[in-house]
Image (cartoon, helix red, strand yellow):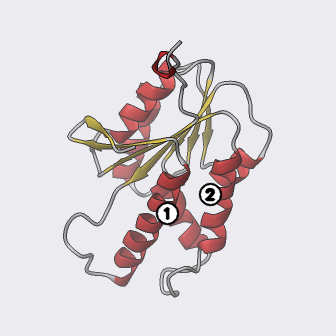
């Protein structure tokens, strides 16, 4: 039997894309077609005063299948470090997690790398996770240089984190205009 006759489902998949690119929808499709139950880690921390963001969260909730297990405001590093249930885990998304970690460390005006312990813990948990894992993250920095220091800090930190995640993931996709392109 030839080597090409074997198909192995990737264990870790990184799905990158810009705002409203379709990255979350594509990642959800991957999870739906994977074997077993799906656990969805929603990393955002909703602000009741931000009605626009609340609408985005509601849209995500509405399109998720009812049989998925959902953990909201989840810390992916902590969840992935715990014993893994059967099936797949989908993390959506690393950008909102990173923002929360920078907030938690009050690091918006700190030097680059202040949140390295947090990103290292996440990468360790991702690399060690024994089941199917799909990670959504924003791809930023393809346009105008952010006007604020905090914007540049986020761009730099997410760019470095995405590179590190891509190295340990089995496959990576970039979603543009709803179209996934395989990077790896």
Q: Residue at x 58, y 80 (%)?
A: 114
Residues at circles 1 and 2 in contact by the CB criterion of under 8 Å: yes
- Is residue 30 placed above or below 33 in the rendered structure? below
Can residue 46 be seen from the camera position used here? Answer: no
Q: Residue at x 53, y 18 (%)?
A: 6
> Residue 158's image quarter?
bottom left
Q: Which residue is mark 2?
A: 123
Residue at the right extreme, as displayed: 83
Q: Residue at x 48, y 15 (%)?
A: 5
Which residue occupies the foreground of this view, 58 or 63? 63
Q: Secondary structure at mark 1?
A: helix
- Is residue 138 placed above or below 2 in the rendered structure? below
- Is residue 48 placed above or below 180 in the rendered structure? below
Residue 1 is tagged as: none
| Gap in angstroms between the C-alphas marked 1 and 2 | 9 Å
Can residue 179 be seen from the camera position used here? Answer: yes
Residue 144: give x, y in percent of width and height.
19, 71
Q: Which residue is mark 1?
A: 161
């Amino acid at each position: 039997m030839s080597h090409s006759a074997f198909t192995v489902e990737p264990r870790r998949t990184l799905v990158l894309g810009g705002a409203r690119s379709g990255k979350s929808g594509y990642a959800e499709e991957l999870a739906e077609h994977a074997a077993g139950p799906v656990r969805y880690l929603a990393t955002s921390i909703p602000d009741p005063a931000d009605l626009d963001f609340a609408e985005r969260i509601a849209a995500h909730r509405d399109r998720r299948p009812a049989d998925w297990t959902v953990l909201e405001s989840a810390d992916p590093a902590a969840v992935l470090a715990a014993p893994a249930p059967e099936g797949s885990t989908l993390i959506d998304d690393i950008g909102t997690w990173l923002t929360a970690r920078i907030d938690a460390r009050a690091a918006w005006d700190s030097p680059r790398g202040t949140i390295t312990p947090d990103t290292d813990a996440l990468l360790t948990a991702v690399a060690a996770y024994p089941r199917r894992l799909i990670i959504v993250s924003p791809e930023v920095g393809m346009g105008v240089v952010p006007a604020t220091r905090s914007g540049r800090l986020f761009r730099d930190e997410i760019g470095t984190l995405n590179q590190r995640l891509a190295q340990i993931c089995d496959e990576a996709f970039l979603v543009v205009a709803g179209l996934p392109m395989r990077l790896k």
